[in-house]
Amino acid sequence: MAKEGKEMFQNKGQRYVTKGVMDSLPVELQALCWNLIDQNVQKQFPLDYLQIFEFSTEKGNQKLVHRQEEPEERKEYLISPKLRLKSVSQKIWVIDSGEYQTMLLPEEY
């Protein structure tokens, strides 16, 4: 496996999404996950090879927790209901293998 560090998630040209994610997560939320990763890369924040996104519904709002283990980091977001996205309760992993990046469901690993 790739190691964590600033070099993770640099290659935006080699990104893939599994069928499970395509079937369960609206494309707008997929794009949000990639965008949050890209923001961290731009800020030169050290990223783990495994990025975890946990979607849930809280008081009628879509909630997103974005976290990683090394270095430990956790951020929470509330997504505006004005976007009118389908509410999702799902955990998504994004893994950087060093050669390519894959967005998948944990059970697809």
Image (cartoon, helix red, strand yellow):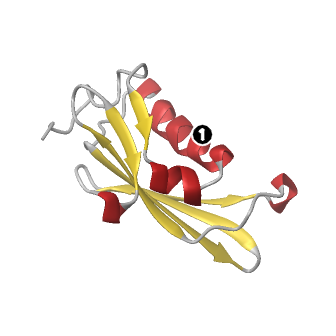
Q: Is residue 14 above or below residue 30?
A: above
Q: Quadrant of the N terminus?
A: top left
Q: Position of residue 42 (x, y in %)?
A: 46, 25
Q: Is residue 8 above or below residue 30?
A: above
Which residue has dot 1 on it?
A: 31
**Could you say whether the residue bearing mark 1 is in a helix, strand or loop?**
helix
Q: At 42% across and 22% down in the image, what residue appears?
A: 12
Q: Is residue 42 above or below residue 96?
A: above
Q: Which residue occupies the foreground of this view, 72 or 48? A: 48
Corner quadrant of residue 57 = bottom right
Q: Position of residue 65 (x, y in %)?
A: 50, 62
Name the side, left or right, on which 48 lies relative to 25. Answer: left
Residue ranking furthest to the right: 82
Q: Position of residue 98 (x, y in %)?
A: 21, 29
Residue type at tag 1: Ala
Corner quadrant of residue 13 = top left
Q: At 83% across and 58% down in the image, what residue appears?
A: 84
Q: Position of residue 55 (x, y in %)?
A: 55, 65
Q: At 22% across and 51% down in the image, what residue appears?
A: 70
Name the side, left or right, on which 84 lies relative to 1. Answer: right
The number of numbered badges drawn on the structure is: 1
How many C-alpha atoms fall within 10 Å of the one at disc 1: few (<14), some, or many (≥20)?
Answer: few
Q: Quadrant of the C terminus?
A: bottom left
Q: Which residue occupies the foreground of this view, 14 or 76? A: 14
Residue ranking furthest to the bottom: 59
